């Protein structure tokens, strides 16, 4: 009997984490949950603990940890970064599913690399802010990063084992997000409810807003550059409303290979958890009829300048990548809190980049230092004109 893979799910109560656990429910003979880390949804975490019986659990706040320790005395429960590190380091962990969103995932990603884990990476921000450093660390260890973003997961499958000299360009597809079918809606009038109502995917609020601004695709462009060592000029971005073609590669003879499936994140998550032995029936089969009306459009970079900003930051250097990610997190957070107009998200990011003074990034602590500085600048930009009319 094949030994079960031990899974650590970081961000277990979020969209990626809950879908990962559904896959484990589908194939309990193949996987076991070793550890769980969650944020504020303690009730959902409590149900996960009861069902999956992990050895280690991490939460954000000590008062939640105390409550769970009293309820589950047989499980080690901790709070904060140290507890998340314990989830990664626990004996028996083979795969770390990195479902923590934003910059907060960087430290546990570093821990997972140091522990030689396979990382099912659903977090793009870690590669955006520290792509070169993470690649260097991975080459020195036995760790492996398999992306869980549907687009990068598609490219991973298409490029794995392929002679890169045969590849001309790679293609990232974008759904167009919640605003694709609202072209006449003034951006000043976009509310958090509208911006988080994604037509194809079930995602958290931050990534849904990123999809609406196209910053999600800007971050993915940067991520693809570091994951696959592809020059930015060789990364195409196309709006594809059906979200069926997740990625493609053009070969040098001008033929194209693409990865297609229904828009269901369980496909990418399942592949990342078990790339050598795919899990049967993770998602429904795509039919030829569903492929009969596929559409592709060039992104509107005038209305949504995020792609331009991402390319400019990539050209400017590593500290500018830290700055663009920090500014975006601050801007999106302010928008969701009602402190910033949607139309000001991109201009806040652009102004933060203009004020940023590029610095060399030679070690991981430089990333954390530049992140703090960029966030301070971005907060200042927000406070100066967050609810003023957009530009």
Image (spheres, rainbow, N blue to C red):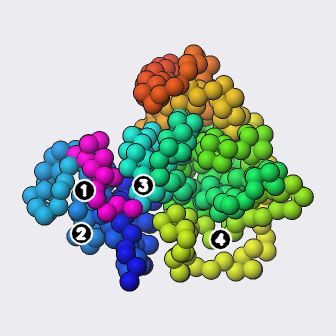
Left or right of 239? Residue 80 is: left
Q: Look at the numbered disc 4 and give the secondary structure of its residue.
A: loop
Foreground mark, 1 or 4, reads: 1
Foreground mark, 2 or 4? 2
Label placed on residue 57 = 1
Q: Which residue is mark 3?
A: 117
Relative to 235, 369 lies left or right: left
Q: On the image, numbered disc 2 is attached to which residue? A: 53
Q: Position of residue 162 (x, y in %)?
A: 72, 59
Q: Secondary structure at mark 3?
A: loop
Q: Nearer the viewer, residue 357 or 208?
A: 357
Q: Earlier in the sequence, mark 3 or mark 1?
A: 1
Q: Nearer the viewer, residue 151 or 308?
A: 151
Q: CA distance from mark 1 to mark 4?
A: 34 Å
Compute the Cα span from label 2 to label 4: 32 Å
Q: Is residue 332 magenta?
A: no
- The percent position of residue 44, horizontal first and vertical second, equals 29, 62
Splitting the image into 4 quarters, where does residue 324 fall? top right
Circle 2/circle 1 CB separation < 8 Å: no
Nearer to us: label 2 or label 3: 3
Asked if 329 appears above or below 376 in the picture, the reply is: below
At horizontal 69% and vertical 39% (from top left) the residue drawn is 307
Q: Secondary structure at mark 2?
A: loop
Q: In the rendering, which numbered label is found on residue 261?
A: 4
At label 3, counting other C-alpha atoms closer than 10 Å, the crowd grade (few under 14, some 14-19, many 20 or more) is many
- N-terminal label among 1 and 4: 1
**What SS does tag 1 mark?**
strand
* Pointer 3 or 4: first along the chain: 3
């Amino acid at each position: 009997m094949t030994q079960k893979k031990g899974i650590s799910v970081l961000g277990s109560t979020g969209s990626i984490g809950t879908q990962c656990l559904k896959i484990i429910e589908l194939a309990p003979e193949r996987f076991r949950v070793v550890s769980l880390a969650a944020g504020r949804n303690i009730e959902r975490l409590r149900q996960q603990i009861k069902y999956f019986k992990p050895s280690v659990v991490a939460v954000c706040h000590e008062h939640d940890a105390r409550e769970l320790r009293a309820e589950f005395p047989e499980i080690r429960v901790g709070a904060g970064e140290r507890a998340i590190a314990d989830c990664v380091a626990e004996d028996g962990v083979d795969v770390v599913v990195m479902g923590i969103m934003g910059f907060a995932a960087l430290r546990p990603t570093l821990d997972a690399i140091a522990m030689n884990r396979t990382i099912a990476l659903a977090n793009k921000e870690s590669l955006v802010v520290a792509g070169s450093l993470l690649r260097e660390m991975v080459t020195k260890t036995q760790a492996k990063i398999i992306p869980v973003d549907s687009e990068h997961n598609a490219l991973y499958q298409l490029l794995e084992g392929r002679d890169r000299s045969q590849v001309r360009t790679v293609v990232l597809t974008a759904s167009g997000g919640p605003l694709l079918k609202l072209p006449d809606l003034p951006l000043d009038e976009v509310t958090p409810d509208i911006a988080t109502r994604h037509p194809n995917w079930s995602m958290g609020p931050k990534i849904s807003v990123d999809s609406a601004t196209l910053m999600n695709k800007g971050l993915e462009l940067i991520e693809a550059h570091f994951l696959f060592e592809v020059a930015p000029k060789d990364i195409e971005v196309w709006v594809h409303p059906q979200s069926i073609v997740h990625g493609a590669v053009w070969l040098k003879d001008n033929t194209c290979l693409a990865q297609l499936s229904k828009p269901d994140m369980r496909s990418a998550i399942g592949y990342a958890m078990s790339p050598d032995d795919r899990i049967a029936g993770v998602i429904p089969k795509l039919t030829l009829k569903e492929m009969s009306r596929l559409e592709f459009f060039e992104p509107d970079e005038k209305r949504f300048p995020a792609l331009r900003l991402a390319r400019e930051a990539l050209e400017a250097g590593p500290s500018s990548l830290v700055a663009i990610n920090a500014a975006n997190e601050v801007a999106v957070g302010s928008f969701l809190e009602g402190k910033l107009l949607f139309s000001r998200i991109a201009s806040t990011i652009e102004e933060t980049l203009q004020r940023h003074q590029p610095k060399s990034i030679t070690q991981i602590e430089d990333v954390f230092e530049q992140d703090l500085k960029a966030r301070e600048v971005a907060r200042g930009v927000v406070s100066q004109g967050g609810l003023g009319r957009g530009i």
